[in-house]
Image (cartoon, rainbow, N blue to C red):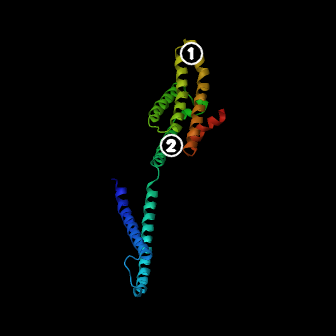
Amino acid sequence: MSPKRQGRRPVRLAAMSAVGLTAVVLAGSLVEVFADPLGIAPDLLPLLDQRASVAGVIISALGLVVAVGALLIQLRAARSSEPVAARDACATWEREQQLARRVLHRLEDHRVLYNPRAWEDEPRVAASIEGIRDYLGEQILQCETTELRDRLRAIQAGLREFLTEREQLNRSVLPARVFSRLRYLWPALTRVRTTVGIAAEEIADVFEIPLNGNLADIVSWSQYRR
């Protein structure tokens, strides 16, 4: 038996005992009133009336005890009847909020998501995007809700698209590679920033994370491209 049930058992026994005793006294009083099995003499009736009044007070007191006991049991049951699923859901949301905050703060550290175009260098951009992709892969394994998991996977898909395009470009012949590299970097990076910005904005909205600093710069890309 659980400790909570053990704690409620004495209260229940006391309440049941009070109910039983009250029922016995009340039944005896009714029998005496209607049947008079004892054949009480008339001169004793006034005394019995006084005692009946005392018995009535006792019965009322016992009824009060029963009512208080039942109320205590009900209050304890109400406090302990909070759905376990609701408590678990609240704890899960708090853990996901902390995870979402860590992910967004990590994205802020990657300037490839918000630096001016002139500052970007293709090899460093690719290395940074690979780092983000690997990091998100680890965080997705810790996700407990689809609200965060799906958005991180959306970012991963955008990063994967960028790296796939770069890999295909590296397989082309040298002249085409040089020409295409100048043309593909900024449009491809813009698509990555848009994908990250949209997901980051949704994550911040769902998990109530303020948008400020570099995080606001990341999210601004989602608003620009929509």
Label 2, secondary structure: give it. Answer: helix
Q: In the rendering, at what x and y percent does residue 112 appear?
A: 55, 32
Q: Which residue appears at 59% of the width and 41% of the height?
A: 216
Label 1, secondary structure: give it. Answer: helix
Dividing the picture into quadrants, the one containing residue 73 is: bottom left
The circle drawn on residue 26 is none
Camera-side residue of 201 and 219: 201
Q: Residues within 10 Å of mark 2 (few under 14, many from 20)?
A: some
Residue 151 in sight here: yes
Residue at the left extreme, as displayed: 1
Q: Looking at the image, is mark 1 or mark 2 nearer the viewer?
A: 2
C-alpha distance separating marks 1 and 2: 39 Å
Is residue 216 found left or right of 19 in the rendered image? Answer: right
Query: Does 114 sit above or below residue 168?
Result: below
| Amino acid beneath label 1 | Arg
Camera-side residue of 99 and 40: 40
The circle drawn on residue 177 is 1
Q: Which residue appears at 38% of the width and 60% of the height?
A: 8
Q: Residues within 10 Å of mark 1 (few under 14, many from 20)?
A: some
Quarter occupied by the C terminus: top right
Q: In the rendering, at what x and y percent does residue 138 appear?
A: 44, 33
Camera-side residue of 154 and 122: 154
Dividing the picture into quadrants, the one containing residue 59 is: bottom left
Q: Which residue is mark 2?
A: 101
Q: In the rendering, at what x and y percent does residue 100 appear?
A: 50, 41
Pointer 1 or 2: first along the chain: 2
